[in-house]
Amino acid sequence: MTGKVQHFINGIGIISPQKNFDNQQFLTEISSYHDNVLNCVTPDFKNYINPIQLRRLSRMLRVGLSAAIICMRDARVTTPEGIITATGYGFLEETEKFLREVFDRQEKQLTPTFFMQGTYNALAGLVALSTKCMGYNNTYVSKGFAFENAMQDAMMQVENNATANYLVGAFDEAASVQYIINSREHHYKREHINSLSLFESNTPGSIQGEGAAFFCISGTPSDTTWCVLKDLRITYKPENAETLIKSLTEFLSDNKTSFDEIDAWISGIAGDTERDVLITTLGKSLLNKTPQIRFKHLCGEYCTAASFALWLGASVLKHQYIPEIVYASALKIPQELNTILIVNQYMNRNYSFYLLQKNQVPRYPAT
Amino acid sequence: MSERVFITGYGIITSIGKNAEENFHSLTQRRSGFGEVIILETIHQKTLPSCEVKLHDEELREATKVKTGIGFTRTTLLGLYALQEALASAQLSATEIEAAGLLSATTTGGIREFEKYFFNLLDLRQEGDFVQFADTANPGEHCEHLADHLGIKKYIATISTACSSSANAIIQGAQLIKSGKLDCAICGGTEALSKFTINGFNALMIIDPGHCRPFDASRNGLNLGEGAAYVVLESEAAVIRKGKTPLAELKGYGNANDAFHQTASSPEGFGALSAMNAALKTGGISPADVDYINAHGTATENNDLSEGVGIQKLFGDTVPYFSSTKPYTGHTLAAAGSIEAVYGMMAIRHQMVWPNLNFVQQMPELSIRPITELIQQATLKNVLSNSFGFGGNTSSLLIGSI
């Protein structure tokens, strides 16, 4: 149901458990983790944030703001027309700190710092303040759909103003409180594994990840364009594999794209035998002839992990190359990579489809 | 982007009423919900009176017919309470509900239960009834519960932009309808009082222990409140197809950022001005066409100055009627935008302007003053409803008569 306007990804800034913040290397240096928790490989924040401001910010606000600035530098945009952020659990570390103060001090003599920094829209406000962006500003906190809601919002904004730049960002932190509490739902594996062996683990539960990723979305291509985000759709709690297959088939046919045209698909498989059933079925049926890429062994599982997949898909199209560490098929990789499909899932509840295409106009400048 | 968006139903629960009817009567009779906190356990029960919904969780559960033990927090229950009224008033069928979108706003989701069971939840050796609240630190959890309970499948989103959250839920619902992605969007917000929130605002030193006085020179902070409200938005095509008579039209909306300070608004009212301007622009009307503004008017020193200056800049010498209904309901944070959108619609339907309680003394920085007595038989065609929040978020809704 996209309009005539196309959605170009004109810049990306990502900080994740892999060293990809500099936008130079493409998964040439891989980090592995051994305690089921993956934390960001962070840049020197001083390159992005002034020292006075830096001292006042929590770790995740530093990570988020830096990712936003990396993205804008990449897109060569100084002030975007709007800022939209997405998170599953927000700044849970700060929320926990404030709660513990409330308990410890029995609701007396509290300072508001952690309360303020724990607000879900704190990053969107901070980025607006830092970029002097007085335009559109929104924050989605819809569990496994937050990033999709935010991106769809930006796509609609762009359809109304094709020359504007919208900054869309996702962030989630691997908070210890979340790890403990989600263990009650067996969200994470009982045994510790090497993160890179996630897909061979064959046990229930996944590993906890985190990251921040910002994307500059515009209706107009530029010489920094990574790719085209053709469309995006969410599917909530499909009853079974047939329902999921039906939704995906509809999504592609609405976009006049056949399965043969998909050069590779990125699977949101989480290495969780209980919750991967539908997405595994998809890989064995509808998409069994399509080269498969996987990513959650690199970034872990979190509500907005689809943002890592979007970076990965955009990178594959930009570099015309699939790194071996993410390639999960025996199929031959096509010579030219033009169309990529992402199918993500969070906790077997929130499913999303993204259709990406190589940018045809203008050509990428020689790098 | 030419299609119009109509409001075909709404539901509301606040400290001044369990439904639209009760809220209407309280508004006309100057009946406020401000008083001692009884249901939430906090040391501030007497020292920081608030606008609490005087129904225990058990009573909310019984009224909404929710089973016990399935993790419905007070936030979710208040939301469901208002949603059931909204769906009934819009007369949506089960098929229509399944194909609708649910856009729900919250500032802290289920933090009330999370803080209550914090130590139990973190100790994995403990098991018990509280386990149903295991995921309440997630703000999107309430929306999934609501969607599952009502059978909404097509689109769900949770929005959190502090005190402008539910205004943004309504804006996003309208955008989804205009872009053709949805025919029907159920949008609003829900908020339960919690220790976390009361202590957070208290630490910021912006709670008035007395009854709040919006736009008064002696104002001394806000009162917190709880409640929920949802509106049913439908496309023009859907309204025509079903032969429905809408209650109002969502004519325009504006979302902007003040980009001034993390927790304060600019004294120049930049954000307020640009949100209201954008609402008028998308609605295709001029300032002179606005008949009433339901102001954000929290009664903090900062908000009322910033908002008042913004209103003066936009309307010049001919400022329309304006008032803040916060003294009735308290500041219901994420729910404030949708609660006040409902009050805006009620104003249009009954052709009445709600009085701004507790206003006595003119603010020296402003030349404008709010309406302090109920106006009946007013002529209201267009109403603006403002919602501003931390992080610089400013939103304004333009609601028009049919």
Image: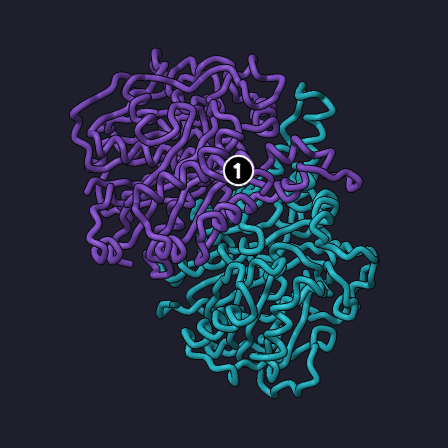
Q: Is residue A200 above or below residue A106?
A: below
Q: Is residue A163 left or right of residue A260?
A: left
For chain A, the rendered hue is: cyan
Residue for point 65% across, 37% down: A95
For the residue pair A308 and B217, the one nearer the viewer reads as A308
- Residue A40 visible in rendering: no
Q: At x 53% / y 63%, what residue is drawn?
A: A238
In the rendered structure, which amino acid carries the disc numbered 1? Thr
Does A61 sit left or right of A155 as displayed?
right
Q: In this structure image, what is the colour of chain B?
A: purple
Q: Residue at x 49, y 69 (%)?
A: A229
Q: Is residue A160 above or below residue B392?
A: below
Number of marks in picture:
1
Assign the N terminus of chain A to one quadrant of the image.
bottom left
Element class at badge 1: loop
The picture places residue B187, in percent across and down from the top left corner, at 40, 45
Q: Where is residue A207 shown, x and y percent of the image?
A: 74, 58
Give residue B398's quadrant in the image. Answer: top left
Label 1, residues with CA under 10 Å away: few <14, some 14-19, many ≥20: many
In the picture of the structure, the residue carrying the numbered disc 1 is B107
